[in-house]
């Protein structure tokens, strides 16, 4: 049994991590933290019958665990990660704090200086399907954002094979369930404001997730600056779907593009390329750790990819555990399926 | 044209009042107040193209209006009502501040002393169908709560004819849309907490609306203490349905009880007694000022009444305007249908 | 490994049974039937990547299984049950066909003659918490309806101790998610008709589930005829909550009634009596096999019980598997938690 | 008063037309038809207290009306339109039957021969903002589809000024509420299938609305074949939002593109160009006849337009009445605001 701790256990991502880890057959949950509810119990905050005492992060017994999951907001995550690494504990960080290679870019997007630029070169971006080899070795895993996961999985087969027309925009029209906005009560998450409504926000290159998507597109040989990203909120609790529009640099048939995606992900247990003619919907992945992809060639050089995940599954807690499994040499889907 | 003002225009009730009053053919909206958004405009808070400047309550030109609607929370409403009455302006108060006859009972339920007990005897409880005659004359109308409106309209034909078995409980199982909880962002109104969930709260005689329901039952000759009230929140933006269970003190047939209800409300333009065999649903009244009632006799002395309104219509802003129309001698449904 | 088959695998109940049984550690799924989709595969009907071939019921290899789950509508279930029993296969029937002891009463409520009255005395009503001992021995288990499960678990502690006032009504105001209405496309389940609406139906003693609730109340020493049952549809996919109002035949305190419920269910792994002061909501049980109960004493002899389940969990497939586990001597919650 | 009739009054579009026409101050509703409910009354099908008898289309007294609204499905609409035109009654047809200029193209997309190709040259496509002058004169108005309305209003300022880069795709990522799928009960509109799900369908150039969008783009000087159209269903009763991505043929600034849209629609009472920096959401237009547009320039030649309507308002019944008003010389928004 691997002893683990969870920082920030009371947000939606933290709670989902606890929920999955309670049943993970190779794990013992040693501690769970919450600053606002320290001294309380997780069952005071959620309608569950589990007994999970909550402690302050400062009281976390780092010497008793081999790994920690940091489910804290960006900025708040850095001190916990630094402390854990100093205690030689392996870290899976679900915040944005260690996803960007460049501390200047971090500061630009997140509005605060990075507290530990020296740790950045040691972190690995945890899109498991792309960086599995590095993930096995890392002690500091930066778990991807939910939007980036859908978009990068949609683009990866094309980027890897250098098939994108570099002069054309990469358009990602994304739709997210409301749990992606976090558990904080705001007017933006008020039922009456959200229900029966659908609202775009941060269109173009203004959402913070743009930074990591652009970084990855560039890293994989594409033109990050070509990204046009339009997130939308939809009245759904959990689920995410990105409809991605790209121009290709050579002609394809429906069959050849389908084969490309099928082949790329053939050995990936968590990516499900739908058969030709089917389209990915949120229902394909809700309450799972799967990503589902469908590809529709609308012209020989125009491709539309639908990419869906559960934003709390493959988009957060599920992918974090998938990465944990890889880091510790466990079966990749242990505790997930 | 009657000049009016609206205090507290930015909550759901206030906004609905503005929305209806903009099109009311006999009214000119002179001012709208908001403490938090004074200096701004209603279109900064809601997705509308109306130009409604917002001012502080202290700056309200009471000398320029004949009537005001107070859409403020309880406690906050009292100063506005007092100021308006001192300026000899007629008041429709949508808060609970002037619904209870007894300032001691007010203090018990609302936890603060009443600022103006002397005004209480001048206020009329604005359940239009019951108190229309008094409403015509009053200068201070206390608009009923949403739950009380559904429950009292369900009970009124029985109370009026003294048909309730006094020793039996009066059970009101009520279901409310979320706008009833107000626009304040709280965990209780967070989309993810509310959506796909249904939750009872304040069961028995603990919800504040109990005070006015009990007062009215007693006033109409019944046993207020017999009330058992169970409100539930449902994942719906607007709408309310109370399923009311009562024991009768003599035998009825389905026909005779149907006749009782039909006759009682025959001359009431805003109460719709459904034909025998149909059951009232929220859809019968949403986006209207109607109350819809259905009566189901399950045993000769056991009756189930389903009573439904739009909580922002007949449950708040709509009924307020209905009362305003009565107060000013206008057609009762002017601006409402 | 116990070999099982599932009749009627493509409705919501059948699909949920398949979903749970795929991961049940002691079970091998040998066949799944569907009349309308025989020759197809479950993944043609649901967005899943499972390979579950569908066969006609007539082709079911009953000689290869030890148990079958019948997830067929009432009436359609009888032939499958009869065939399975003739083949000496143990049956868990999720329909209403074997719940009622009396074939005349069956005919009255379900409008068709019972095809096998001789099997009725051999069937056991599968409310696990009440009939566990008999369930262990039976070869024909009649899995309870969803509404009856909520209502009977709410009443059981009172019935068992003979605490109900016999002259008073037993009022069950129930709210159900839409999956309880089945997967058949009807106007009643059309999104636009259901969404943002809440509708009562079949008030009194007219819903078919009344038959089994009344039978059980009588069997447990109560007055079945006292039941007043008001089901309501709510715009939620899965979940059920019954608010049950009863009169007691002696005075209680909040503490003593809480103790009664806690003690009654102390050894029951699937019934969760909430601590005093908390109220059961749908969120307490969704996506689980739990029933959650809260008790609120509103007067010394007036009790309100909130009883919630997932209508596809403890209300159908989950309870069926719980009963299967009991029948086969397995841990009661195996494959369920 | 203008006497009118409504064919197909019981679907969502027909019902909405009745609802608006009941209150239209210049109109008298003479008849409403329904084949399936002839002899009944609209209040048997909807929870309303209106008395609207339903007759068969064959019994419609065309000699008693000046105009008819055809709210029938495509194909079914043609005979009613032909009969009305023969009776010299002016027609507003909400189906697709008279939207396409070319009967061959109609047959290709709708799979049936056109019954009256000779009428096609007399019909005018009723996107009011573009064809108002022709609409005034026409006796046969083809009311646009909901998706085309959002997309064409988004493109019109660019097409009119010849600002689209002809070699680049025109991408419309559209999201529609479920009432757009009609009132027929199908698995696709079943609450449990739709709720908490978001699903793309008919991606590329396969949805039937493509035909009229392409026709109009070409007619307005653009390259219709450049269209890539991706409709999605969202769990919302009514509302539509299209996010439209286009490449421009010259450089713009945020200000100049904002001015272009503001100027184009300055005199249009039903199109609302949001101020710079705001994004159009479904809430901007629900339960209104407005279209709301927001423009976001993401690069000097890359523009994202969000275009929203109520699919039953400006997307169907509302626009039909707007066109009716224009045809009869009434104020354009009469009965609509």
Image (spheres, coloured by chain):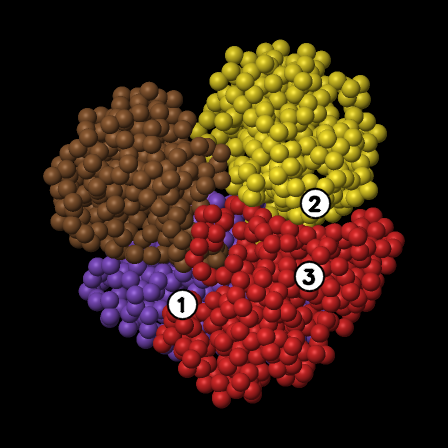
Chain colours: A red, B brown, C purple, D yellow
How far apart in space, not on screen, are marks 2 and 1 (Cα)?
Answer: 48 Å
**Residue drawn at (50%, 49%) of the image:** A194
**Residue drawn at (74%, 47%) of the image:** D203
Residue nearer the viewer, D64 or A144: A144
Dividing the picture into quadrants, the one containing residue D81 is top right
Answer yes or no: are tags 2 and 3 on the same subunit. Answer: no
Percent coordinates x, y for residue A36 in the rendering: 39, 70
Check the image and report above or below for B204 versus B127. below
Q: Which residue is mark 3?
A: A214
Label 1 secondary element: loop
Which chain does tag 1 point to?
A
Percent coordinates x, y for residue A198 in the rendering: 56, 47
Label 2 environment density (alpha carbons within 10 Å; few <14, some 14–19, many ≥20): some
Q: Which residue is mark 1?
A: A45
Residue D214's disc is: none
- Mark sitting earlier along the chain (3/1): 1
Q: Which residue is mark 2?
A: D300
How far apart in space, not on screen, are marks 3 and 1 (Cα)?
Answer: 37 Å
Q: In this view, which residue lies farthest toward the left? A: B118
Q: Is residue D32 left or right of residue B42?
A: right
Q: Is residue D145 left or right of residue B79?
A: right
Answer yes or no: are tags 3 and 1 on the same subunit. Answer: yes
Residue nearer the viewer, C313 or D197: D197
């Amino acid at each position: 049994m691997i002893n683990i701790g969870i920082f920030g256990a009371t947000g939606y991502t933290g709670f989902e991590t606890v929920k999955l880890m309670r049943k993970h057959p190779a794990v013992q949950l040693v501690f769970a933290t919450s600053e606002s509810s320290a001294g309380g119990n997780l069952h005071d905050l959620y309608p569950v019958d589990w007994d999970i005492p909550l402690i302050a992060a400062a009281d976390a017994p780092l010497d008793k665990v081999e790994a920690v999951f940091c489910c804290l907001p960006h900025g708040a995550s850095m001190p916990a990660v630094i402390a854990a690494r100093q205690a030689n504990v392996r870290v899976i960080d679900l915040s944005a704090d260690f996803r960007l290679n460049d501390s200047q870019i971090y500061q630009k997007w997140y509005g605060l200086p990075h507290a530990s630029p020296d740790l950045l070169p040691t972190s690995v971006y945890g899109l498991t399907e792309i960086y599995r080899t590095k993930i096995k070795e890392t002690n500091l895993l930066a778990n991807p954002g939910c939007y980036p996961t859908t978009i990068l999985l949609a683009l990866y087969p094309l980027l890897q094979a250098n098939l994108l027309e570099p002069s054309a925009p990469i358009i990602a029209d994304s739709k997210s369930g409301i749990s992606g906005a976090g558990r904080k009560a705001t007017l933006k998450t008020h039922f009456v404001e959200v229900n029966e409504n659908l609202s775009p926000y941060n269109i173009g290159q203004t959402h913070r997730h743009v930074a990591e998507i652009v970084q990855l597109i560039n890293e994989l040989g594409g033109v990050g600056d070509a990204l046009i990203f339009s997130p939308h909120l939809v009245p759904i609790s959990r689920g995410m779907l990105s409809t991605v529009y790209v121009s290709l640099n050579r002609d394809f048939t429906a069959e050849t593009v389908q084969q490309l995606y099928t082949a790329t992900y053939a050995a990936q247990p968590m990516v499900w390329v739908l058969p030709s003619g089917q389209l990915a919907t949120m229902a394909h992945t809700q309450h799972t750790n799967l990503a589902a992809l469908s590809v529709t060639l609308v012209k020989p050089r125009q491709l539309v990819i639908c990419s869906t995940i559960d934003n709390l599954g493959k988009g957060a807690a599920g992918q974090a555990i998938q990465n944990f499994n890889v880091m510790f040499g466990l079966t990749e889907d242990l505790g997930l399926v």
